[in-house]
Image: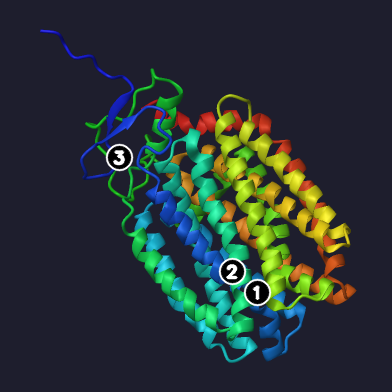
């Protein structure tokens, strides 16, 4: 009797603790489906829509409460600082706890807090509620990013992270447009009451995502790259859901695996030794500094420079940003995955050049006076920035091993959150000092050039850092 041939391209994978194995074909971009990435993208989308309702409705809010541009920018900055204080503990939790539950809980709390903005009766109350929301809104990122790293192997990571980033940045202009339109048609408070509803629904959707075995994405990446590398077999014991990978040797006090504040600090120092991580964090923090200021003040810019009303200014700024972001994410993530593993340091090189392209286009948007060319330059700036974000976020996942990926993304999110928060405040202060938002925008150009150069210098070390992150899984 003939023995059936064994298909070496298909394996039974122990992907979810306590559940039957899953059949995976070698090279498949989404071996466990795209639903988890969609759910994470929805979380990012609704978070940014809510956050940017404030920017769209800001002129109406300033009229009601009577505060200046510096005080307006301080709202975003204070919320981001609160988030930074909580992100590192959240990253440690992402490496030890059940990530799907954590994300769902964060979104549920955020949905409840959103109602407080609509109920604010003074600047002080508005400021306090937005600080709490700023802290809560960013805490989903470390566990969600860690999940994507496990569920999507290296060759498809730019698309998985690109989907989340596309939703994140699409939420910026959508929030701006909705905030301006609702403020004009009804009242600025209306948008905040409405957006809490989809927030609660999305929290429930996150509970439908299964918690995967940690490191499964990296082991699949190794198998995809080299058929001789053993795939994770169905018979292998899987770690408990939410548990971090157990180090092969004992962990001394203060070492990267230790607990407590000293252990957390040691882990952060260890992560910071990764050259690619340092460059990605530095580049993205400067990029978010520019984007945070751009989107926060863009509706006010079009009102003051071109005499548009609230709804029209929000629609123009938000529409140009949305088109640019979606085009940049789509093109950048496709190119990033296409060249991954074929060209040295491809994701980092592509990210650096995309960031530089966006910076040049932004300089054009600041310098150009006529309305239509200015809008075109603004849209092109977003194309470049979005392409950089998709690839640099995927590169961040590639160079940090699975057991520390939550903390790695917490470090990234902490720094870029602070950078993004400083943008609105500094541009607001520059606007008060110069009397011109156009001149105030110029403050972000030089830092963006510096960020581009930092990223471009790091591409040579990317492949070695990515191989080091995979080594614990290739040796299993």
Which residue is denoted by mark 3 in the rendering? Answer: 15
Measured along the vertical axis of the image, is residue 259 above or below residue 432?
above
Residue drawn at x 57%, y 38% is 334
Measured along the vertical axis of the image, is residue 392 above or below residue 370?
above
Residue drawn at x 33%, y 42% is 213
Give me the C-alpha separation between circle 3 and circle 1. Answer: 43 Å
Q: Given contact means CB atoms under 8 Å apart, are the residues at marks 2 and 1 in contact? A: yes
Residue drawn at x 31%, y 51% is 210
The picture places residue 172, in percent across and down from the top left corner, at 61, 63
Q: Nearer the viewer, residue 55 or 316?
A: 316
Residue drawn at x 76%, y 44% is 356
The picture places residue 440, in percent across and down from the top left corner, at 83, 67
Which quarter of the rendering shows the N terminus?
Answer: top left
Residue 389 visible, this angle: no
Give the label on residue 175, or none.
2
Which quarter of the rendering shows the C terminus?
Answer: top left
Specify few, some or many for label 2: CA neighbours under 10 Å numbering under 14, 14-19, or 20 or more: many
Specify few, some or many for label 3: CA neighbours under 10 Å numbering under 14, 14-19, or 20 or more: many
Give me the C-alpha separation between circle 2 and circle 1. Answer: 7 Å
Give me the C-alpha separation between circle 3 and circle 2. Answer: 37 Å
């Amino acid at each position: 009797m003939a023995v059936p041939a064994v298909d070496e391209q298909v394996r039974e994978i122990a992907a979810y603790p306590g559940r039957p194995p899953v059949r995976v074909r070698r090279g498949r971009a989404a071996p466990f489906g795209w639903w988890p990435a969609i759910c994470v993208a929805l979380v990012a989308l609704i978070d940014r829509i809510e956050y940017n309702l404030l920017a769209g409705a800001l002129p109406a809010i300033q009229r009601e409460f009577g505060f200046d541009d510096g005080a307006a920018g301080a709202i975003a900055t204070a919320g981001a600082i609160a988030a930074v204080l909580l992100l590192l503990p959240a990253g440690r939790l992402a490496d030890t706890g059940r990530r799907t539950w954590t994300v769902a809980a964060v979104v549920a709390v955020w949905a409840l807090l959103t109602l407080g903005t609509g109920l604010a009766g003074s600047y002080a109350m508005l400021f306090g509620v937005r600080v709490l929301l700023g802290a809560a809104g960013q805490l989903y990122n470390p566990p969600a990013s860690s999940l994507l790293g496990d569920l999507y192997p290296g060759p498809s990571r730019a698309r998985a992270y690109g989907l989340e980033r596309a939703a994140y940045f699409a939420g910026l202009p959508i929030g701006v447009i909705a905030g301006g339109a609702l403020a004009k048609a009804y009242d600025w408070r209306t948008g905040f009451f409405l957006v809490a509803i989809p927030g609660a629904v999305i929290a429930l959707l996150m509970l439908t995502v299964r918690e995967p075995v940690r490191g499964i994405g990296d082991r699949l990446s190794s198998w995809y790259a080299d058929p001789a590398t053993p795939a994770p077999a169905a018979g292998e014991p899987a770690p408990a859901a939410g548990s971090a990978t157990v180090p092969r040797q004992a962990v001394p006090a203060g070492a990267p695996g230790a607990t407590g504040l000293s252990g957390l600090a040691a882990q952060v120092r260890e992560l910071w030794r990764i050259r690619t991580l340092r460059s990605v964090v530095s580049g993205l923090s400067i990029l978010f500094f520019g984007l945070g200021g751009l989107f926060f003040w863009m509706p006010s810019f079009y009102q003051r420079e071109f005499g548009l009303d609230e709804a029209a200014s929000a629609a123009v700024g938000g529409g140009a940003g949305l088109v640019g972001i979606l085009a940049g994410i789509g093109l950048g993530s496709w190119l990033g995955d296409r060249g991954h593993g074929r060209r040295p340091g491809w994701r980092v090189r592509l990210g650096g050049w995309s960031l530089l392209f966006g910076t040049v286009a932004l300089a054009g948007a600041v310098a150009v006076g006529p309305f239509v060319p200015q809008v075109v330059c603004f849209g092109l700036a977003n194309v470049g920035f979005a392409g950089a974000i998709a690839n640099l976020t995927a590169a961040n996942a590639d160079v940090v091993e699975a057991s520390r990926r939550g903390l790695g993304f917490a470090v990234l999110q902490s720094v870029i959150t602070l950078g993004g928060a400083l943008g609105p405040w500094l541009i607001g202060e520059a606007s008060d000092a110069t009397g011109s938002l156009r001149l105030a925008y110029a403050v972000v150009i030089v830092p963006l050039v510096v960020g581009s150069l930092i990223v471009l210098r790091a591409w040579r070390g990317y492949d070695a850092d990515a191989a080091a992150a995979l080594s614990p899984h290739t040796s299993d």
